[in-house]
Structures are given as structure tokens and as C-alpha cells.
Image: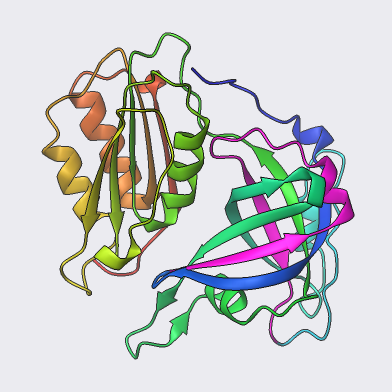
Amino acid sequence: MSPRIRPDRRDSRLFCAAVTSSTRLTPHLQRVTVRGETLRAFPWQGYDHWFRLFFRHPHQERFHVPEVGAESWWKPYLAMPDEVRPYCANYTVADFRADDGELDIDVVVHRDADGEIAGGAAIWACSAEPGEELALLDQGLMYDAPADASSVLLVADESGLPAVAGILRSLAPGTAVRVLQEVPTDADRRPLSGPPGMRVDWIARTDPHAVPGAAALTALHDYDDVDPHGYAFVVGEQTLATEGRRRLHRAGMPKDRITFSGFWKTERH
């Protein structure tokens, strides 16, 4: 049901590109499209293919490309002086067009208590101008469904929506799939392509001050059709990921059939 492919970290490659456009898809999602000649060779695998995104901080005059070592990228990145070290964040490939060397990045638009756009990535995405330089470090897939999985369950908050969309688009026809997808508002729903018969439960938060992921976790606790022979992919705010995995395991799903990842951690409780 999945290729179960991981890139060899020793062969990780940095792809340089530049912004071509930045567009608001929904009230809380900004799409940044980037292009670069090296991106034509990006080894896109579909599903939740993700990468590390490097871009210039607002106070930096220009973008400095980080080095990627033979065994790791982290140490040489941290060794860069503060005044030139770029911002780093993890993102999913929202769409990819190899012939054009073009890739889409969907960024959640967070806001602070005053309603202002908050967070380094959101501020960058919403203000990015054509020509803005950046780099991507390929990280492969997290999605890892066993070949004998009888069904797929996807659970996410808005930060995991690009991964959910990519997985649905990559699943084979005939895959039995259920989605519990939390979004900030009803206006943040978006069309999703996937196997015929898939069921998507959109869970819009009714309280704008609610902790993201909490509504999806409640829906998962109320979910009575946990398939011990299936596969689950639970991502988003850290509590959703960790508690979601715990709930599924207690309901009978083996741990090796659950992929979970905390994409971020809220400061609200």
C-alpha cells in the first residue's frame, strides 16, 4: 500500500530555488510556489514527501545557502554565524511539476492575540516576493503503511492537511480510507482527490481560542471503527500526535501500524 522508501541521509541533497508567487488558498493557508533548475531532479515520491525549508530571516540582507555535510546537515547549519544562518522549518510538498522545476509549499497562517500574522514561516510566506531565494533539503516519506494494511486512517490538524492531501492523492484506487481533518473554520475546507469511496470528516473549530488538534483528538476518541489490521497516520500539534497514537494502540492497533509526528507544539493549554 506504500513504497516504504526513505532517502539515504548520507546522500541528502540541497535544492536551490526562488519564489515565483505567494497566494492565499484559504483563510489560514498560504501557498508559496518556488522554481529552480535543480528542482527538475527532485526525487518526489508523492504521499507526504517532506523537506527542510531554508529561507532568509527578515533582518538578513541576503540568503546564505547552508552546507550539507556527508553525514548530517545540523552541525554545519548550527555552526553558521547568527547573522547569516537562515530560518529552517519542515514542510510537505503540496504539489510538484518536474518539467517546470516547480514546487508548491502550503504554509499555515498563524495569528497572535491581536490578529497579526505570527511565526517566522507564516510571516515569510505571506510576504515572500518573486525572486526570494531559498533552499530545500529532501527528507523523503514518513507515511509507511504495510503492504497488508486493510484500511487507512488519517488524522490531522491544519498543519497536517498538506500531508493528508498528498497521501490521499497517492493512494491506489480501492483503498479503504477515512480522514478526520481538523481546520480552523469551515472556510478552510478544500477539495481533496483520493480513492473513490473515501470518507473525509471535516472538523471545523467552533472556538477561535481552542487549542488546534484538540477537536481532532476528541473525534478520534469517539471513533469506533479502529481496524487492528489497518494503518493510521496521525500528525499535527504534539498532543494530537502522541495522545492519538495512545488511543489507537489501546483500541487494538499495533504500534508498528501507526505513524505519528508532532509537527509543532502549542504554548496554550
Task: Name the side, left or right, on which 170 lies relative to 6.
Answer: left
Residue 40, quarter of the rendered image:
top right
Residue located at (60% from left, 40% from top): 49
Query: In percent of the image, x 69 and y 54: which residue is there?
Result: 103
In the drawing, does residue 221 fall left or right of residue 233?
Answer: left
Count all numbered tags in the image, as a single digit. Answer: 0
Instruction: Estimate the x, y position of residue 160 in percent, counting from the top left.
Output: 43, 50
Q: Nearer the viewer, residue 265 or 235?
A: 235
Residue beneath the point at 39% across and 18% down: 174
User: From the viewer's perspective, is 66 left or right of 74?
Assistant: right
- 127 or 10, nearer to the observer: 127
Q: In which quarter of the image is residue 90?
A: bottom right
Q: Is residue 236 shown above or below 131?
A: above
Residue 252 seen in the figure: yes
Which range of residues does the magenta coloring cover? 29-58
**The C terminus sits in image quarter:** bottom left
The residue at 38%/20% (across/down) is 175
Please identify the residue farthest to the top as the structure is shown: 148
Q: Residue furthest bottom?
A: 114
- Place residue 232 in its image quadrant: top left
Q: Position of residue 190 (x, y in %)?
A: 38, 56
Where is residue 145 shown, x and y percent of the image? 46, 21
Q: Does the magenta stretch include residue 55?
A: yes
Coloration of the structure image: rainbow
* Above or below, comparing residue 75 to residue 70 in the picture: below
